Amino acid sequence: MVETGLHRLGRGLADIIWPPVCPLTGQAVDRSGHLSAQAWQRLTFLEAPWCDQCGWPFPYPGGVGASLTLCAGCIANPPRYDRARAPLAYDGVASPLVVGFKHGSRRDMIGQFARWMARAGSDCLDGADALVPVPLHWRRLIARRYNQSALLCRALAPLTGLPVWTDLLVRHRPTPSQAGRTARMRRRNMAAAFAVTGPSRTAGRHLVLIDDVMTTGATVTACARQLKRAGAASVRVVALCRVVRETDPTI
């Protein structure tokens, strides 16, 4: 969204009345939505080399001249999506940013989130036809008042020039929270939870799923499965964060 003079004035007045502070450290910052230097140093940003398919970070580069490097999990059990990227590791430092955004209506960081995602997901966004948010079931949407994935899509749209198709996927089956579930339980929980509303619009398209946190990948896998069944040429994923477990590089 282009910031108008009125928006800038309103933001300036708000910063005077409520001096902006870093959401992680509480230190004073120059404007709302910015992080302190200490907070920047504490966050774990994911960078290449990583698995070409799921974005799992590798501790060292692949072989010389290797054009496609896959992690053990993607070799053993290839995901339904074609590629996934995330700029941040989801850990104890990043968690307050995500939880505040997801459950606390803290939207002051959304512009920064979108810039991080656009940078990390450039190879997913390149050549795409549309951004598709992972949908919420209508009951959860009413309770939460907004879909955080749709907000991330709208923040990414002006950075990428891509349209946002919020109505392409629906979550027609309510699912219990994924927290505390194993990878297998998460996959079962997501089975048949999503449906495509416009197969004719999906056919032959290169789509990018947008989500906030990628844990085992069960949710985006379930979404990608339905989009591929509806004829999507490719389904890529860009998330704000992903869980990185040293002992389990599978999603």
Image (spheres, rainbow, N blue to C red):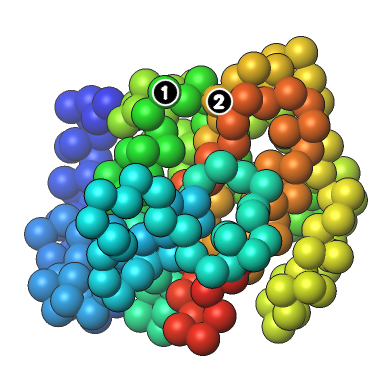
Q: What element carries label 1?
A: loop
Q: Where 82 falls versus 207 (above or below)?
A: below
For disc 1, the neighbor class at 10 Å (few under 14, some 14 to 19, many from 20) is: few
- Left or right: 5, with 139 as reference point: left
Residue 127 numbered mark, or none: 1
Q: Where 21 falls versus 49 (above or below)?
A: below
For disc 2, the neighbor class at 10 Å (few under 14, some 14 to 19, many from 20) is: many
Look at the image and tell me in which quarter the N terminus lies: top left
Residue 80 position within the rendered picture, expressed as x and y whole percent measured from the top left:
67, 47
**36 and 115: which one is in front?**
115
On the question of residue 99 being in view, the answer is no
Residue flagged by tag 1: what amino acid is it?
A: Gly
- Left or right: 77, with 172 as reference point: left
Tell me whether circle 2 and circle 1 mark residues in contact (CB < 8 Å).
Answer: yes
- Left or right: 37, with 121 as reference point: left
* Residue shown at 53% from the left, 36% from the top: 208
Q: What element carries label 2?
A: strand
Question: Which residue in the structure is indicated by mark 2?
Answer: 206
Residue 200 position within the rendered picture, expressed as x and y whole percent measured from the top left:
76, 13
Label 2, label 1: how many angstroms apart (C-alpha)?
A: 7 Å
**Going from the N terminus, do you reach mark 2 or mark 1 first?**
1
Residue 244 position within the rendered picture, expressed as x and y whole percent measured from the top left:
46, 75
Residue flagged by tag 2: what amino acid is it?
A: His
Residue 197 position within the rendered picture, expressed as x and y whole percent measured from the top left:
81, 26
